[in-house]
């Protein structure tokens, strides 16, 4: 085999595998978006479909949007009852019933095998619920189907996420949760970047007794699992009256964290020492050197730390679950879980729409900064 | 200490001052307090009362403690090796010279930044036994054999494997790290191996693997530490799939009662914080052992840093 041919076959294998994996990694996203754009009955029907649709058929001579209720297996007819308790009702009778009581029914139209029972579709969420929706049984060929995305699921999902609850004078809704998440994220990111930069400078660019030992201790704290800290931390925040507020979620970020100190220190050490020396000879204070020389040269690492922290906070579930007690302080992530646990698993279309909205900010942020991001992760190797 | 030394020390402490406070308040104090509580009878409502090693004695006899530990080890034992293989496999594929590499990398990485609550909702729906995507795909394949997909999260046998499958979706992070490791393997090594007549598989086993083994081992142990602390997905999905009942019950049939979930409910629902602290310390010791192992594999990594 020539080298050229061998590399061509292996290339085909590689590309095939890549596409298979891509399909597997993409499928959950497709399912998320697909469900979020379906009407409820299409999320709860078999076989599973991906493309959200709208169906149209004639009921009583009017072309309306319908739901496909079930397939009728027998042949028979749609007929009106002529006497008895059900007089005047329209129903389906199969051939045998019709043959047994021909005088009991007035046939409206015959039903060929494999027809579908369809009902006029009402927008339940808009309160358009009629007493009994009009229905008919029609052959599949007479049902028209079109691709239709129900974007209206999104505003409705967000509205029901809040549950319209009132706490004091404040109405708790999606915007409250978004505001809480943003508050925690923004205050946390600012605190993380500022505090860790200052601290890392002390470890990276200054020489002082005990520095290396202190840094070793700092690294060691990275291995302490959060569950070990959970109980006493709760006690600390409780003692300061911070339980039920957003403070425990962003305040600690202003006091440094081992991982970020490590990351920034690594970066600061790559900046040539001569720059600082020259400034020191010119009589610059350390603070000025930090602020005027080191910080302007460190944008990449500052961005990485800010991004990591934003995503960490946005995605965090355990800490909000621990510290937040009232609905009006919930972050988006906690609100989503609380919505799911209260409404059970029925309104999947809303749940997926709300999830998609929760995911969107991190995906957008990531797409804008993906290079910085991936480089950041690749250089750390230990961020989980 | 000379005057300059003292001045330097003051500067150093000045810059690291925030961290000294942070370290003391948010790590050092909790670590010590947690150890103390583990020897106490303590609920947050009353002050702790010393009770010696009673908590630890009770733990040894606590069936749920062992159950949660077994569940956690089962999950970790499946998700970590599988996750490592998938991440490494993807990294090797992406290290080949193919078009559209960055688009693939983007796609594989993206799930790992999806908020855990959102991905828990999504996978809860995917694993829905009746209308979910997973069985929607599996059932047509299994039908000829007279089988159908399980109820996944509502079935004690399949609830943990379901969480493992979900975890594989998030391996993009490790993939990026491995990819960086692969790109650091010197090209001459491959050329030399090729000249010696090594085929692609032999090159992978004899060149690639030894070169990135330390990175893989380090990250696998980090993943193991993470898996030992599994909480959010299991907490959300167990309740979501099994309805009524408490999110910390580990339904169905306690098959998703993981270590941290049991710890959480002991501490914050039963308010047995001393007992929970004892559990936390056992986790701490296991983690410390694993970290020591990871540090051995990564020797040089942090030493470079110092």
Image: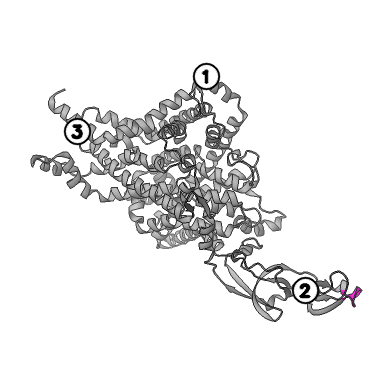
Q: Residues within 10 Å of mark 3 (few under 14, many from 20)?
A: some
Element marked by disc 3: helix
A272 lies left or right of A161: left
Farthest-out residue, bottom? A61
Q: Name the N-terminal-most of marks 1 and 3.
A: 3
Distance of mark 2 from mark 3, alpha carbons? Answer: 88 Å
Most foreground residue, A115 or A155: A155
- Numbered label attached to residue A113: 2
The residue at 48%/45% (across/down) is A317
The chain to which mark 2 is attached is A
Q: Is residue B157 above or below residue A137?
A: above
For the residues carrying marks 2 and 3, which lies nearer the camera in this image?
3
Q: Is residue A129 above or below residue A306?
A: below
Disc 2 crowd, CA 10 A, few/some/many (<14, 14-19, 20+): some
Q: In which image quadrant can residue A137 be found?
A: bottom right
- Badge 3 is on which residue? B11
Mark linked to residue B53: 1
Within the magenta stretch, is there residue A13? no
Residue A170 location, x and y as percent?
47, 52
Q: Residue A101 lies in magenta, yes or no? A: yes
| Quarter of the image with the C terminus of chain B in it | top left
Position in image of residue B286 (x %, y %): 48, 30
User: Quadrant of the rendered structure where residue B16 is?
Assistant: top left
| Secondary element at image label 1 | loop
Magenta residues span A98-104
Q: Residue at x 53, y 27 (%)?
A: B275
Say whether residue B182 is visible: no
């Amino acid at each position: 085999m020539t080298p050229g041919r061998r590399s061509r076959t292996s290339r085909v294998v590689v590309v095939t595998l890549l596409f298979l994996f891509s399909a597997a990694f993409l499928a959950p996203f497709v399912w998320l978006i697909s469900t979020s754009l379906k009407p409820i009955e299409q999320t709860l029907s078999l076989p599973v479909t991906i493309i959200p649709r709208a169906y149209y058929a004639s009921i009583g001579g009017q072309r309306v949007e319908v739901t496909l209720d079930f397939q009728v297996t027998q042949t028979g007819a749609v007929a009106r009852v002529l006497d008895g308790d059900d007089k005047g009702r329209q129903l389906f009778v199969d051939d045998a019933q019709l043959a047994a009581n021909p005088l009991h029914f007035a046939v409206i139209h015959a039903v060929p095998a494999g027809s579908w029972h369809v009902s006029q579709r009402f927008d339940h969420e808009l309160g358009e619920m009629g007493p009994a929706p009009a229905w008919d049984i029609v052959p599949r060929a007479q049902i028209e189907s079109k691709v239709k995305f129900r974007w209206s699921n999104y505003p409705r999902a967000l509205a029901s996420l809040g549950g319209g609850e009132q706490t004091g004078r404040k109405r708790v809704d999606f915007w409250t949760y978004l505001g809480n998440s943003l508050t925690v994220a923004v205050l946390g990111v600012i605190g993380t970047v500022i505090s860790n930069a200052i601290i890392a400078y002390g470890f990276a660019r200054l020489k002082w007794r005990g520095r290396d030992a202190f840094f070793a201790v700092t690294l060691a704290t990275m291995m302490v699992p959060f569950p070990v800290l959970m109980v006493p931390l709760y006690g600390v925040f409780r003692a300061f009256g911070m339980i039920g507020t957003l403070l425990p979620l962003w305040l600690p970020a202003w006091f440094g964290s081992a991982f970020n100190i490590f990351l920034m220190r690594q970066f600061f050490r790559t900046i040539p020492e001569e720059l600082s020396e020259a400034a020191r000879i010119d009589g610059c204070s350390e603070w000025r050197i930090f602020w005027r020389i080191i910080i302007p040269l460190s944008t990449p690492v500052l961005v990485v730390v800010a991004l990591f922290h934003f995503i960490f906070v946005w995605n965090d579930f355990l800490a909000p679950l621990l510290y937040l007690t009232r609905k009006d302080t919930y972050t988006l992530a906690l609100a989503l879980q609380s919505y799911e646990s209260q409404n059970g698993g029925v309104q999947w279309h809303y749940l997926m729409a709300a999830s998609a909205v929760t995911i969107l900010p991190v995906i957008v942020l990531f797409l804008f900064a993906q290079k910085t991001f991936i480089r950041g992760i690749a250089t750390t190797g230990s961020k989980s | 200490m000379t005057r300059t030394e003292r001045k330097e020390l003051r500067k150093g402490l000045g810059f690291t001052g925030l961290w000294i406070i942070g370290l003391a308040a948010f790590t050092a104090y909790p670590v010590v307090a947690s150890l103390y509580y583990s020897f106490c009878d303590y609920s947050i409502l009353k002050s702790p009362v010393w009770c010696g090693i009673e908590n630890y004695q009770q733990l040894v006899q606590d069936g749920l403690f062992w159950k949660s530990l077994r569940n956690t080890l089962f999950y970790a034992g499946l998700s970590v090796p599988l996750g490592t293989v998938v991440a490494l496999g993807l990294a090797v594929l992406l290290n080949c010279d193919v078009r559209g590499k960055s688009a693939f990398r983007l796609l594989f990485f993206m799930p790992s930044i999806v908020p855990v609550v959102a991905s828990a909702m999504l996978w809860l729906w995917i694993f829905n036994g009746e209308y979910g995507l997973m069985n929607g795909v599996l059932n047509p394949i299994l039908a000829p054999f007279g089988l159908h997909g399980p109820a996944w999260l509502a079935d004690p046998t399949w609830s943990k494997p379901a969480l493992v499958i979900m975890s594989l979706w998030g391996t993009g992070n490790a993939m990026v790290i491995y990819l960086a490791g692969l790109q650091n393997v010197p090209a001459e090594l491959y050329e030399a191996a090729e000249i010696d007549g090594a085929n692609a598989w032999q090159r992978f086993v004899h060149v690639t693997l030894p070169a990135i083994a330390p990175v893989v081992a380090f990250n696998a142990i980090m993943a193991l530490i993470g898996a030992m602390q599994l909480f959010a997905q299991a907490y959300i999905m167990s309740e979501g799939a099994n309805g009524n009942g408490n999110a910390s019950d580990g339904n169905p049939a306690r098959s998703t009662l993981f270590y941290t979930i049991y710890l959480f409910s002991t501490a914050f629902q039963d308010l047995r914080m001393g007992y929970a602290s004892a559990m936390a310390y056992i986790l701490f010791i296991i983690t410390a052992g694993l970290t020591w192992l990871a540090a051995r594999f990564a020797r040089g990594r942090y030493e470079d840093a110092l």
